[in-house]
Amino acid sequence: KNQVEQSPQSLIILEGKNCTLQCNYTVSPFSNLRWYKQDTGRGPVSLTIMTFSENTKSNGRYTATLDADTKQSSLHITASQLSDSASYICVVSIGNEKLTFGTGTRLTIIP
Amino acid sequence: EAGVVQSPRYKIIEKKQPVAFWCNPISGHNTLYWYRQNLGQGPELLIRYENEEAVDDSQLPKDRFSAERLKGVDSTLKIQPAELGDSAVYLCASSLLSVTEQFFGPGTRLTVL
C-alpha cells in the first residue's frame, strides 16, 4: 500500500565517509518531495523540500536530487558526522495537506 | 520561539485502560496534525485540524480514538480503551496554514501491556 519506498532500510558507515539514500515513489499527482531527519526519540525535522520542477536542493552537507520522470529521489550526505546518525524519511505530498511517508533509512555513523 | 510541545513524553498503561495525549502547537499555527508512528515505519496521519475543525479524520479509528481542539489552539488525543496494537509513538505537528511546512513535536511513546 505504501507508495513511497526507501532503500536501504539501514546503513552503517564510517565517520567522514559519504553516503546516498534512495527514495522511489508512485504517489500521483505529485506536488513536492521532502527529506526529513528523525533523531531517536524526536520528531522529524525537515532537511529539504523540492517541487516537481526542481532537480536538486542542498542544505549544508545534505544534497537532495529529484528525477520526476523516473519518480526517484536521493539524499546524499557528504563528510558524515556522528550527529548524522538518525532515520531519514522521504515524504511525498499531494498539495501540502496529504503527506505520504516512506518507512525511512536508519543511518548509523561509527567513529 | 518554542516548538511544538507534547506531553507526556512516555506513557505505559495496561490494555483496556484509557490514555490521553496533549499537544500545544507553535503559536499562531492554524493547522494541527496527529500522527501515529509504529516502530520502523513512517508516520501515518490520524487527524488534521484547521483551527477547531477536524477537516480530515478518515484514518482515525473512531471506535476507540477521539480528538478535540476546542479553542483552535492546543489539542488532546484520547484512546479508550487501549489495545496492545496501539503501542506506538504519537506525533503532533503544526503548520501556519495547511499548505505550509509542518513542524513536529517530540512525540509521546505509548506502551500498552
Image: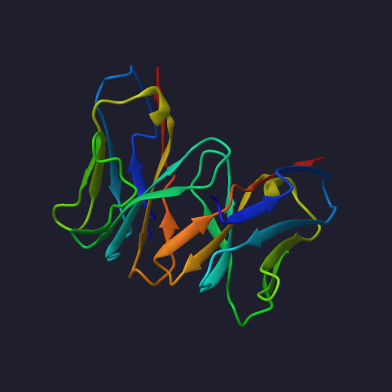
| Residue at (75, 50) in percent of width and height | A81
Q: Using the image as rendered, state which of residue A20 and residue A71 is in the foreground.
A: A71
Q: Quadrant of the C terminus of chain A?
A: top right
Above or below, A40 relative to B68: above
Above or below, A45 relative to A33: above
Residue A37 image point, x, y percent: 59, 53
Q: Locate residue B19 relative to residue A58 in the image: left or right.
A: left
| Residue at (52, 52) in percent of width and height | A44
Residue B17 image point, x, y percent: 26, 21
Above or below, A20 relative to B107: below
Furthest-bottom residue in this view: A53
Q: Locate residue B16 relative to residue A57 in the image: left or right.
A: left
Residue B111, located in which quarter of the rendered image? top left
Residue B13 visible within the image: yes
| Residue at (24, 41) in percent of width and height | B62
Furthest-left residue in this view: B70
Residue B74 image point, x, y percent: 23, 51
Residue B93 image point, x, y percent: 38, 54
Residue A106, located in which quarter of the rendered image? top right
Q: How is the image coloured?
A: rainbow
Q: Using the image as rendered, state which of residue A85 and residue B113 is in the foreground.
A: B113
Q: Locate residue A52 relative to residue A111 in the image: left or right.
A: left
